[in-house]
Image: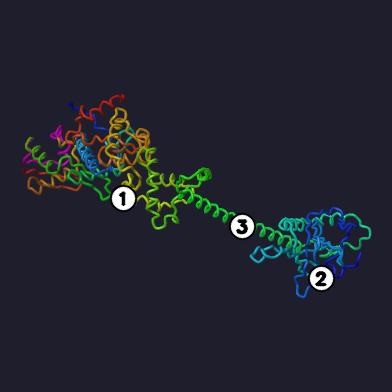
């Protein structure tokens, strides 16, 4: 074995024991974690504090970094104990780094020497880096230090004191140790965060790519002219259909967006909305509140959601275009979308029929009652009842039970002859209805 | 058609917001209140106090303070009632106007031959002559107002012998 401890820095690099076939001799409990070939170990400092180790195999174990020269030249296997490492520098990806060999820098004692590992070969560099961190933070050598110091060691000198242990490794003791551990923790978290954000950025850029790809495909499909040529075109058509099916299954529709429609955004949105609204109106009994529509429309769009303001603008534009739907504002401030053909009179007559029934003459109706009978949303029913009240068809009764509406009998009561209880007209009906109750 | 003592529909206990309905509602309640007060000889209504007309326990309804004030104010507005305080808590109901009461007193005086007589105010409202007449139990405030009106017209003179005595009236009809 050559004496090789003096490559520049005393105590940092030590001779590594190898077998005759060049495999490192591992110590008790030491486990090999990673192997990379064509690795250099360079000195960062200028002037360099040690002679660079060129072109060797780098072996990472739980306790050490071992460098073994790949050619049996003058070079000698060396190792650095992981415990000597004070700092591993996070690897920053940059444009420059993409063209260079991957590197890792670390700092070690004694001497605060900066070392750069240069990976000139192929291999799982990222995997190595991860393992490097793991092993370094794993501090496997500390377990042994504890157990060793408890048993008596032959040939052991004085009990290790201070920062450096017997074998020259750095001990994590005292406040310095705690602080260092904190530091490592920080760096590890920082690194994880950085990695995570890298992934997120990658995801985002991929998503954009996907969307633009899908758009291109869609354009192709749309612009493909029908042709009457031979079988080759049939194949084309077939594959185009396949593409369409695939796109549908992926769920990409082409919503009107501000990019696609530009200045005509609101107009086009307005038309798209009108189409969509027609179906919804049928289901909702002819009238739907603006907020309900906002929910349904955006849900159907999936992405590229529109703001409430855009929705409202699109609705107001309906006045200018010839669509069969309209926006309407009630006195209470509630805004609804309804068919232009919607007739208030029709609803009024239905309400009138409802409140002049024997039962409802007596008990009145609530908004929910009306909603059930008219088959519309309760909020809409309330608006209709309020409108009917304004028209004088109904009057109200507010009680602890809530707000109820009754057929308005006021017009049928003669104020000059209050006690005249009529037996004809709706008044008469009311009398009959209420006298069914035994008082 | 038939007459009945039964009250009109219990539909109008809530103040109606719609104008036409609201006005009709006020009209109805005005009539109702005046008729009731005349029939029951009620001269004073305390707005926050219980008043049989303003509640119906059978249907668990009562007129809100706002409603009571609205209806009474409407009666005040047409001159058939007066608020006795700025807070609108006490309302004097004039189901006969003061002028009407004046006519009633003059009629009363003639009927009983009291043209030149002396009477105390209390005798006018609770004396034997007034039994069974409209004057029986008349509100004292209303009576005093009426007498003052008649005094201004020279039909009588009000006087007080001592501060301990009740006021006296000398008719000179």
User: 10 Å neighbourhood of mark 1: few (<14), some, or many (≥20)?
Assistant: few
Inspect the magenta stretch and tell me whether residue B125 lies in it.
yes
How far apart in space, not on screen, are marks 3 and 1 (Cα)?
48 Å
Q: Position of residue B52 (x, y in %)?
A: 28, 35
Q: Secondary structure at mark 2?
A: loop
Disc ID at residue A197: 3
Quadrant of the image for the C terminus of chain A?
top left
How far apart in space, not on screen, are marks 1 and 2 (Cα)?
83 Å
Nearer to us in this view, B20 or A241:
A241
Q: Earlier in the sequence, mark 3 or mark 1?
A: 3
Q: Earlier in the sequence, mark 1 or mark 2?
A: 2
Nearer to us in this view, B131 or A397:
A397
The residue that mark 1 highlights is A319
Nearer to us in this view, A216 or B53:
A216
Q: Secondary structure at mark 1?
A: helix
The answer, for residue B54, to whether it is visible in the render is no
Which residue is painted at 64% across and 57% down in the image?
Answer: A193
Quarter of image, res B61: top left
Inspect the magenta stretch and tell me whether residue B146 lies in it.
no
User: 10 Å neighbourhood of mark 3: few (<14), some, or many (≥20)?
Assistant: few
Say which chain tag 2 marks: A
Nearer to us in this view, A300 or B20:
A300
Q: Secondary structure at mark 3?
A: helix
Say which chain tag 3 marks: A
Rendered position, A324 above or below A80: above
Q: Which residues are magenta?
A: B112-133
The residue that mark 2 highlights is A51
Q: Position of residue A14 (x, y in %)?
A: 86, 65
Say which chain tag 1 marks: A
| Residues beneath discs 1 and 2 located on the same chain | yes
Q: Residue furthest right?
A: A154
């Amino acid at each position: 074995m050559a004496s090789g401890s003096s490559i520049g820095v005393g105590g940092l690099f030590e001779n590594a024991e190898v077998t005759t076939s060049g495999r490192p001799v591992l110590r008790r409990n030491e486990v090999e974690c990673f192997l990379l070939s064509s690795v250099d170990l360079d000195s960062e400092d200028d002037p360099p504090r040690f002679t660079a180790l060129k072109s060797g195999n780098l072996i990472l174990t739980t306790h050490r970094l071992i460098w073994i020269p790949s050619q049996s030249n003058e070079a000698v296997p060396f190792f650095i104990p992981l415990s000597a490492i004070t700092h591993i520098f996070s690897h920053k990806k940059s444009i420059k780094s993409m063209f260079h060999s991957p590197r890792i820098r670390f700092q070690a004692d004694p001497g605060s020497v900066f070392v750069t590992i240069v990976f000139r070969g192929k291999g799982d560099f990222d995997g190595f880096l991860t393992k490097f961190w793991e092993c370094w933070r794993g501090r496997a050598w500390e377990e042994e230090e504890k157990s060793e110091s408890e048993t008596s060691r032959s040939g052991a000198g004085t009990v290790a004191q201070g920062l450096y242990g017997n074998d020259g490794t750095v001990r994590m003791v005292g406040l310095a140790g705690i602080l260092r551990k904190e530091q490592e923790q920080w760096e590890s978290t920082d690194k994880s965060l950085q990695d995570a954000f890298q992934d997120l950025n990658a995801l985002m850029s991929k998503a954009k790519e996907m969307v633009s790809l899908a758009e291109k495909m869609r354009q192709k499909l749309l612009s493909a002219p029908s042709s009457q040529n031979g079988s080759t075109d049939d194949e084309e058509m077939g594959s185009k259909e396949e593409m369409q099916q695939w796109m549908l299954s992926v769920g990409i529709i082409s919503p009107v967006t501000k990019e696609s429609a530009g200045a005509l955004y609101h107009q086009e949105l307005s038309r798209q909305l009108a189409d969509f609204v027609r179906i919804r109106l049928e289901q909702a009994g002819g009238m739907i509140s603006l907020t309900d529509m906002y929910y349904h429309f955006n849900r159907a769009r999936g992405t590229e959601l529109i703001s409430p303001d855009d929705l409202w603008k699109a609705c107001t534009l309906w006045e200018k275009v010839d669509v069969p739907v309209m926006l309407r504002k009630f006195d209470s401030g509630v805004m609804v979308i309804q068919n232009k053909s919607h007739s208030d009179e029709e609803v009024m007559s239905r309400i009138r029929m409802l409140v002049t029934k024997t039962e409802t003459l007596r008990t009145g109706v609530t908004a929910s009652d009306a909603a059930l009978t008219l088959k519309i949303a309760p909020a809409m029913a309330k608006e209709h009842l309020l409108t009917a009240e304004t028209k004088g068809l109904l009057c109200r009764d507010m009680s602890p039970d809530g707000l109820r509406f009754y057929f308005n009998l006021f017009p049928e009561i003669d104020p000059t002859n209050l006690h005249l209880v009529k037996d004809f007209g709706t008044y008469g009906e009311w009398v009959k209805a209420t006298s069914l109750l035994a008082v | 058609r038939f007459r009945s003592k039964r009250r009109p529909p219990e539909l109008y206990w809530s103040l109606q917001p719609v104008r036409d309905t609201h006005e009709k509602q006020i009209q109805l309640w005005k009539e109702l209140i005046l008729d009731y007060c005349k029939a029951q000889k009620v001269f004073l209504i305390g707005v926050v106090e219980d008043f049989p007309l303003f509640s119906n326990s059978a249907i668990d309804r009562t007129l809100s303070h706002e409603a009571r004030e609205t209806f009474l104010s409407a009666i005040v507005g047409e001159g058939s009632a007066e608020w006795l305080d700025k807070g609108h808590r006490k309302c004097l109901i004039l189901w006969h106007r003061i002028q009407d009461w004046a006519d009633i007193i003059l009629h009363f005086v003639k009927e009983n031959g009291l043209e030149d007589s002396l009477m105390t105010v209390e005798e006018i409202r609770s004396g034997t002559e007034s039994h069974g007449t409209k004057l029986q139990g008349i509100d004292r405030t209303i009576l005093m107002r009426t007498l003052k009106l008649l005094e201004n017209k020279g039909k009588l003179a009000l006087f007080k012998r001592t501060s301990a005595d009740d006021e006296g009236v000398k008719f000179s009809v």
